[in-house]
Amino acid sequence: MQILIAGASGLIGRALTAHFAERGDEVWGLTRNRNRSRKRSAFSVNWIRWDGVKISENLPGAFAPEVIINLAGKNLASGYWTGGFKEKLVESRLLASQALVNLVRRMDAPPAHFLQASAVGFYGSRGDEILDENSSRGDGFLADLAARWESQLQPLENSPVRCCRLRLGPVLSADGGMLTKMLPPFRLFLGGPLGSGRQWLSWIHIQEVVQAVQFLIDHPELSGPFNFTAPEPQRMKEFCAILGKVMNRPSFLPAPEIILKTVLGDMAREMLLSSQRALPKRLVTAGYRFKFPTLYVALAELLGKRELP
């Protein structure tokens, strides 16, 4: 199977590239720097140069992807959330999605599957409310961003191309993302929850993301939005307590909400202190079986702790 990944050099993109390459699939990746991507990739990838807005070279005759996976977008945590930075977050997602949709509409043989990244931020901060794919859109910058990102697929809705929107929760990985930022203070016995610790965290293991993507590819009857979250979300306080248990470290030094808001502004309010209790209802209903359903099992695997209680 031939698969095109936009955002192949990111955290999820690297994991998917490894998965598909090991399966023997033909992987194509969009990149701003082909030479750098070739050097960094441990697997054989056909790199196509683009600037996030358009593909800047002629596509080879062998290019005929059956699956397009769009993960492209500027990292939310890569800068302070000024008005200008927020605009870049929006543009990087909308323009990349528009470019890929336009590519599909120009293709003589369009792909069968288009999988588009989104986020549980779509639901806004909802306290203890249980959220599934039928829950309404929430309020705030991230909710607006996710909704606009998902809306870019509308031109394909009545086409033969099957579209899935992946509402990702915070992805746990030993190679980057949220977990690697939390480990240093815990190693120094300085770990603890952010803010009150009562906010819900709808996490997911990186390999679960990979397997769930493969599940959707293997089930062409499925389409629409899917929460990519573990079936057992945790409150922030419980998340940190379990992380401390796995690491044999305490979790008693919270980061006060007022300090987080003062230092990080909107990013703290919308990313670190917001609460989404999102459940993967549609994946479970479709028959997907989670390999890492509980946080302890997920963290133990990621941190090399093989003995489980």
Image: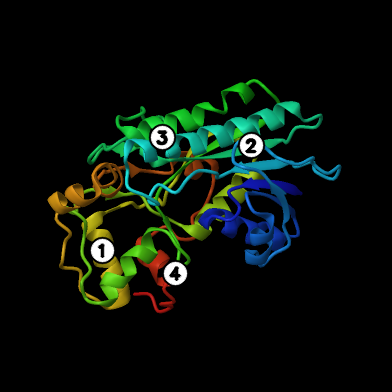
Q: Residues within 10 Å of mark 2 (few under 14, many from 20)?
A: many
Helix, strand or loop at label 3? It is helix
Residue 222 coordinates in the image, percent (x, y): 59, 35
* Colour setting: rainbow
**Viewer-closest of 40 and 212:** 40
Q: Residues within 10 Å of mark 3 (few under 14, many from 20)?
A: few
State the residue at coordinates (73%, 62%). 44
Residue 302 disc label: 4
Where is residue 9, by image quadrant? bottom right
Residue 152 disc label: none
Residue 288 coordinates in the image, percent (x, y): 53, 49
Residue 240 disc label: 1
State the residue at coordinates (71%, 35%). 112
The amino acid pointed to by label 1 is: Cys
The residue that mark 3 highlights is 87
Helix, strand or loop at label 1? It is helix
The amino acid pointed to by label 4 is: Leu
State the residue at coordinates (64%, 57%). 17
Where is residue 220, by image quadrant? top right
Residue 233 in view in this figure: yes
The residue that mark 2 highlights is 114
Where is residue 61, by image quadrant? top right
Residue 234 coordinates in the image, percent (x, y): 29, 54
Q: Residues within 10 Å of mark 4 (few under 14, many from 20)?
A: some
> Disc 1 vs disc 2: Cβ atoms closer than 8 Å?
no
Residue 16 coordinates in the image, percent (x, y): 60, 55
